[in-house]
Amino acid sequence: MAPRSKTARRVPLSRDRVLRAGVALADEVGIESLSMRRLAQRLGVVPMALYKHVANKEELLDGMVDVVVGEVEPPVRDADWKSAVRQRILSARETLLRHRWAYRVIESRSSPTPVVLAYMDSMIGMFRAGGFSVDLTHHVMHALGSRMLGFTRELFDDSPSPGSAPAAMPPEVAERYPHIAEMAMTRDHDRASTVGAGCDDRFEFEFALDLLLDGFDRLHRQGWTSTGH
């Protein structure tokens, strides 16, 4: 039997294949280095072939966000609302740790993508299934913000710069900001668990998340409403 030609063996190009290749390429080279031309080279096609599946780079990025968010584990069935929400959010965080560029792309979108909307809808559904009113759930979602997708950017960052030790803070700076110096020299953050520069590590993320969930639980038990607080 004659060998099959390369054309016959080639995997057909599809939107899903393009998006997943885009995610893999961004994981490898970083989102700044992702281009339609480079992606086409990775797939072994001419750049114009990509435009049959994504209209432009922005649509490519939207689709890549959907691929990443689609990797978050589904809600745990038959779990109480707090456990289910906590597990889902921590799964989202682990997903973003696998794709460290993704949180910046999510932040850059002008509107939520379909999969992000479905994710948000399921988060709302978990609170509603837990007995939360629409009013309280509304404010809960605002309080969670990007944390529900597994990341948050913090104003306060006491982690040392790459290659520096906490004790390397210049004396004049430490004297001017004594409390920051004290904290910086006391706690060295786990750099390996950081989603991105200026983002919280695992301990800080879970610390704040648990504070929020405990607060939501207290308000729910009190029958809190935005008009009666």
Image (cartoon, grey):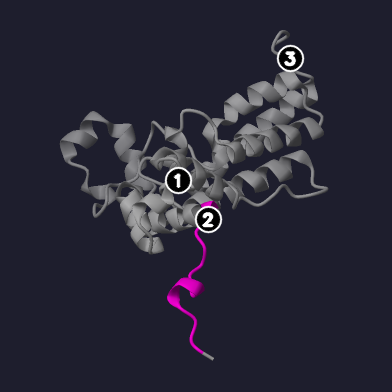
Q: Residue at image x 61%, y 50%?
A: 72
Q: Is residue 199 visible?
A: no
Could one spot residue 178 in this view of the protein? Answer: yes
Identify the secondary structure beneath mark 2: loop
Whole-number angstrom distance, CA of label 1 to CA of label 3: 35 Å
Which residue has dot 2 on it? 14
Q: Is residue 169 above or below residue 117?
A: below
Range shown magenta: 2-15
Q: Residue visible at 35% across and 44% down?
A: 197
In x, y percent, where is residue 28?
A: 37, 60
Left or right side of 59 for 160: left
Which sits in the foreground, 177 or 215? 215
- Residue 112 versus residue 5 in the image, above or below: above
Q: Amino acid at mark 3?
A: Thr
Q: Find residue 102 and name its label.
A: 1
As measured in the structure, the alpha-carbon distance from the residue carrying label 2 to the one carrying label 3 is 48 Å
Residue at x 45%, y 58% (from the top left corner): 21
Which circle marks residue 225 in the picture? 3
Q: Residues within 10 Å of mark 3 (few under 14, many from 20)?
A: some
